[in-house]
Image: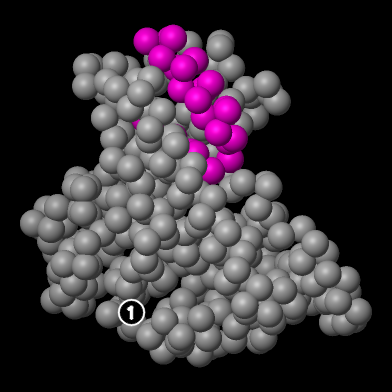
Amino acid sequence: MKRSFIREILEAIDEETISFAGGLPSENLFPCEDIKTATLKAMENPKIYQYGISNGINELRAQIAQRYTNEGFPTTKDNILITTGSQQAMYILAKYFEGKNITIEEPSYLGAMNIFRLNHLNMQGVKLENDGVNIEAFEKSFKDTKLTYIIPDFQNPSATTYSDEKREEIAKIIKKYDGILIEDSPYGELFFDKKNVSISSKLPKNSFHLGSFSKTLVPSLRIGWIRADEELLKSLMIIKESIDLHSCGISQYILTEYLKDEQKYEKHLQEIRDDYSKKANFFSEQLNLIMPEFKHEKPKGGMFLYGTFEDEIDTFALVQECLKKKVVYVPGNQFYIDKVPNGEIRFNYTHSSFEQIEKGIKLIKSCL
């Protein structure tokens, strides 16, 4: 079992390296003062230092549940399980479905694929199109697996957003075969135009909807969650308790205090969307200007831009040359089950400045 290429890359680079590799949010947008205020307030409560309940503190689960309900997806705190980041949520689910067959997108999120391999899930890849998975291929695979993991909102790595039509088709297929959907949505709030309706909302008893505050607030709190039918969550509690008893109580109480001012959080989310939209547009413009042979679609949200070279270029070999010039990205082959080299690249645009974006693309161009 190999480590994540992205984690290895992050450890190999230094402060002089322009990194388009990791899915890092912009540190300039962290609401430091607001979190400091929430922390000082939370620290006044002695309960913050005590063991907590395994599914997460009640108030935080209720806050998350209310956001779902406000969006038209009726949810109570009993439908929410707090996890140590959404990565732990995926591990819990992979352990629960250990040894099963599972339908995934190709390309797909590297972190999930590594977890699935570790838990002996047999992955069946279905090709992603520009508006979601190929429906015919998805149904053929899902008929066999009755379990799927997908990222419909600004997908990692491809930045693909599922159309309303394909969301409906997928929901129908899952209902038809009475299967299970694992819907990963760490980027759902990072939309540039509109928020999409989750597929899980059409399948409340047949879905696990995964969320996280790592991309919308700060990663170091390590707070994610699973939204699911109460009976489904009960099946996961034994696994959660065997891992860490409960997620960090201090982080949960800080986050609860911060979320009490809902307008402040919404204002923060809009600031992120505005900043990331400008960076996505600039990154796309610079690619078209400096490296037009790299074909891509401008993102509609999220943190990534994905594309491929017109000619057959091994982007895994290319990134080794780019590292020597202090610029790095993630080659597309890392997001496929068989990892065969290809001409695809995933770029992260949220963590770099406008100057770094322009300079970094020029450095990559010089390595071709």
Total marks in image:
1
The residue sitting at 59% across, 48% down in the picture is 25
Measuring from the top left, give residue 171's x and y in whole percent: 21, 73
Front-most of residues 12 and 313: 313
147 lies above or below 103:
below
The residue sitting at 68% across, 68% down in the picture is 247
Q: Quadrant of residue 85?
A: bottom right
Measuring from the top left, give residue 316's x and y in whole percent: 39, 21
Residue 74 among magenta residues? no
Q: Is residue 40 left or right of residue 158?
A: right
Residue 360 among magenta residues? yes
Q: Is residue 129 left or right of residue 31?
A: left
Q: Quadrant of residue 342?
A: top left
The residue sitting at 50% across, 25% down in the picture is 358
Q: Which residue is mark 1?
A: 201
203 lies above or below 214:
below
Disc 1, SS? helix
Front-most of residues 320 and 69: 69
From the image, which quarter does the C terminus lie in? top left
Highlighted range, magenta? 345-368
* Coloring scheme used: one colour
Measuring from the top left, give residue 142's x and y in whole percent: 18, 61
Q: Amino acid at mark 1?
A: Ser
87 lies above or below 80:
above
122 lies above or below 172:
above
